Every structure is written in structure tokens, then in C-alpha cells.
Image (spheres, rainbow, N blue to C red):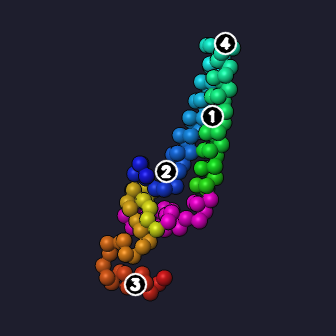
Amino acid sequence: MIFKSAKIEAFRTWGLLLTMLGMGLMVLGTAGIVFFGSAGKILAGIGLVIGLIAMMGSLAIYFWAGMMSVSAVQIECPECNKLTKMLGKTDRCMFCKTIMTLDPSQANITAEQLEAQKSTS
Ligand SMILES: [Zn+2]
């Protein structure tokens, strides 16, 4: 991800960006009629269609993010002791952006902690 944020937050950011883009295109398209008259109608049509697709896309991303946040594992962050949600094996804390992992081979923990993790899971 480009942003240093938790995966769910990143999806929300992209969803918001797409919504803004879609709304912007719709406004621009409508403004096209005002500024260019009849010629702007084609522009407005294209703007409205792309805007609508972008907004539907953002809706899909929001829905997807919602579905994933349901299946996400809720854990207490070892850094800031706040409850955060993890997607997949590795994700960042929503609050302090610490990278966390559920994969013991990726975590830089001691052998003792690794053994304790194996026995509990
Ligand atoms: Zn944290």
C-alpha cells in the first residue's frame, strides 16, 4: 500500500477518494452544460457515466472493506494496548501504525515466545 496505514483504513481512503472523484466528475459534467451549452451535454453525459461508475466502485470497496472488517481478527496492539483489527497475516495497527504479524516465521520474537504461540494455537 502507498499509505502507511492499516489495510482497512487504506480501503476506506480509496473508497472516499473514489466517491470524491465520482462526485467531482458529476459536478464538472453538469458545469459543462452551463459553460459549453449543447456541446457540453456530451461532456456532461460522459462525466455523469464515469462519475456514476466511480461512485459504484467506491460503494463496492466500502462493502468489501465492511465484509473484511467482519472477518478481521481483533487483537490488542502490543505497542499502544488499543484494540485494533488485523487483515491477513500482516497488518499495521490502526492507531500507532506498528506492523504486526500472525505468522511466527515473520515475527522477530524470541524462541520462547514462539513456543508459547505454538502451544496455544
Ligand atoms: Zn498500536
Residue situated in front as seen by the camera: 120 or 32: 32
Q: Is residue 13 left or right of residue 81?
A: right
Closer to the camera: disc 3 or disc 4?
A: 4
- Element on which disc 1 rests: helix
Residue situated in front as seen by the camera: 27 or 48: 48
Mark identifier at residue 74: none
Is the C-beta separation of discs 3 and 4 under 8 Å? Answer: no
Mark identifier at residue 10: 2
Q: What residue type is labelled 2?
A: Ala
Is the C-beta separation of discs 4 and 1 under 8 Å? Answer: no
User: Quick check: is the Cβ at mark 4 less than 8 Å away from ligand 1?
Assistant: no
Q: Residue at x 59, y 65 (%)?
A: 71
- Element on which disc 2 rests: helix
Q: What stretch is highlighted in magenta?
A: 67-88
Mark 3 or mark 2: whose residue is earlier in sequence: 2
In the rendered view, tell whether residue 71 sits above or below residue 39: below
User: Quick check: is the Cβ at mark 2 less than 8 Å away from ligand 1?
Assistant: no
Mark identifier at residue 116: 3
Mark 3 or mark 4: whose residue is earlier in sequence: 4
Instruction: Tell me the CA gap for discs 3 and 2.
Output: 32 Å
Q: Residue at x 51, y 46 (%)?
A: 13
Q: Residue 90, percent across and down?
A: 43, 65
- Element on which disc 3 rests: helix
Instruction: Tell me the CA gap for discs 2 and 1.
Output: 23 Å
Residue placed under numbered mark 4 in the picture: 37
Packing grade of label 2 (10 A; few <14, some 14-19, many >=20) is some
Q: Which residue is drawn at 58% across and 55% down?
A: 65
Residue placed under numbered mark 1 in the picture: 50
Q: What residue type is labelled 1?
A: Ile
